[in-house]
Amino acid sequence: MKKLLLSIFGLSMVVNAQEFKKPDGCSTYWQQHVDYHMNVDMNVKNYQYTGTQKLVYTNNSPDSLKQVFYHLYFNAFQPGSEMDVRLQNIADPDGRMVNNLGTKENPKYESRIAKLKPDEIGYLHAETLTQDGKPVAFKEIGTVLQVTLNTPIAPGASTTFDMKFKGQLPVQIRRSGRNNKDGVALSMTQWYPKLAEYDYEGWHADPYIAREFYGVWGDFDVKINIDKTYILGGTGVLQNPDEIGYGYENDGDTVKRPKGDRLTWHFKATNVHDFAWAADPDYIHDKLKTDSGVTLHFLFKNDPEVLEAWKKVQSDAVSLLDFYGKNVGPYPWKQYSFIQGGDGGMEYANCTLITGGKSYKGLLGTAAHEFAHSWFQQLFGFDESEHPWMDEGFTTFISSLAEQSLSGKTDENPFGSSYRSYIYLANSGHEQPLTTHGDRYALNVAYSIAAYSKGCLFLSQLGYIIGQDKLMETLHRFYDDFKFKHPSPNDIKRTAEKVSGIQLQWYLTDWTETTNTIDYAIKSVNEDGENTKITLERKGLMPMPVDVLVVYNDGTQETFYAPLRMMYGQKSNPYPNVKRTVLKDWPWAYPTYDFTINKPKNSIKAIVIDPSQLMADVDNSNNVYPEQPAAEDAQEN
């Protein structure tokens, strides 16, 4: 209906990303720092590996730390783990992680983890651990290692942990794994003992149940010793390309591989909070140097069914790099790798693992989304468990704009599917607040729509509130002020307030901490002498400012804008070619609001609340006057 209205009224209000001069910003946040040195030996026959890890941890907090925690993610892939048990008890388990022994209509799910044999499970164990050369006591608790320190780490002090560890890569079930559906041998993600983050909230030693991650900023120096027929891609810059070859060598250089049947790949990555890699003997490796100085790598199977799409997407990746750089901020690292692997699409530091490629459109959509995570996750370092809506939602927002830009279609709302999904959830009775921890959603579908769709709408709707120009300026200011700083929801709110001059606590509170919905209606349109009195009604609990479009029989149009009182400000006119009248502000406590048009009722062709389609009104059937026929009635007529 809304698309039809826009067409009838000839009104265009398209959300386009814009480039702005970035304001200076500052921050007083503290955060921890860690440097990793790891040497790993991988056995490609039994999928087991051993490693040593030297970890230098700097405590920048004001607290003395008496213990630390590590994540041992691979222990989730064992019968009886929390991940396994959750699969057996959630009503809509992830289809990749279960077998359906029933029918589509009457499913009977069986956890794939529950069926793993000892040589198929995943595990990750610390064998020895010292602090500054002295053994420390540690205890493995599922996917978490709890370490009691001999000497507390004082504020501002650093300590060194040395560990010997061993692991086994599980059968591909979720994210990590061996021999995935595309035949990729090794998807090595969340594979090493990873220090948990400690911030102003305390330790984030979350068990690995389903959702994503949160890590400590630092530098990685990683050596991977593996069968020399395997080709690797992953986090960081390869330090010995002329010993490795496989397309990594510098132009014109001769590859001089050492003798023997194994190679040691040496990677370094700076200022990241994760390290991932994948390996396969049949990878094709393409390398593309961009004008920005960033090198893009593409590693994909030598499979005729996917070759065309993986080749075609490479030029699009350059366009995506440019788009995100202009509309958020420059990509700060030297390389990025698009790697075929994993179980769908998942972001990691300097790389993504993506399955498929038979469909170019599908590959492009996944690549656009995962690459955008390099900003809205890897660069900002959101807590993906606690605030998944910032990670997935902001990524969905910017990647939707990017895909629209690549397609050349600028006449549609790029977030339309996100609005439809959110409204479905809001009306379903299954919605939970965005403040819900990622693992504590009752349903996977509720998590997915909340994180991806409602999180996206936080930004698109913010543009409705403060104006599209101020929204994109907010993203640039956010980049400048909070890159590499683990920002929280309040930080994006405060950034938008500083940029726009509009107060937004009400918006952050209602949209993220409640399930209050937006529902505004045209209650009545009545003659008032030679004028027309329009009465609007707030039927939902969530407040919003309201734009109203009036179209007259002679073809002219004008808009009326009722700011929300608690905004204490107003946006600029989103339709500069259409006359706008700014009305008195609307206090939330008042359920109705009246204003008068200085024209008779019979001169009015239509009245529309929110012609931009950017306000997430859960019932738009009452947003139009005269009332539009229902879809089924229109078809009958």
Image (tube, rainbow, N blue to C red):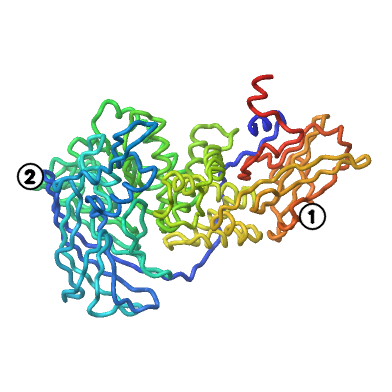
Question: Dot 1: what SS?
Answer: loop
Q: Which mark is residue 233?
A: none
Tell me which residue sits at (30%, 46%) in the image: 175
Name the residue type under label 1: Lys
Q: Position of residue 494 (x, y in %)?
A: 57, 62
Pick the front one: 401 or 624: 624
Answer whether labels 1 and 2 touch (C-beta < 8 Å): no
Circle 2 residue: 261
Question: How many angstroms separate mark 1 from mark 2 (CA)?
Answer: 78 Å
Going from N to C along the chain, the mark reached first, 1 or 2, is 2
Relative to 384, is 575 above or below?
above
Q: Which mark is residue 584?
A: 1
Q: Position of residue 599 (x, y in %)?
A: 88, 39
Q: From the viewer's perspective, is the residue at label 1 or at label 2 nearer? A: 1
Relative to 214, is 418 above or below?
above
Question: Dot 2: what SS?
Answer: loop
Q: Is residue 53 visible?
A: yes
- Compared across the picture, whether 413 is left or right of 111 comes to right
Q: Quadrant of the C terminus?
A: top right
Q: Quadrant of the N terminus?
A: top right
Q: Is residue 327 visible?
A: no
- Compared across the picture, whether 205 is left or right of 626 comes to left
Q: Position of residue 634 (x, y in %)?
A: 67, 23
Tell me which residue sits at (82%, 40%) in the image: 525
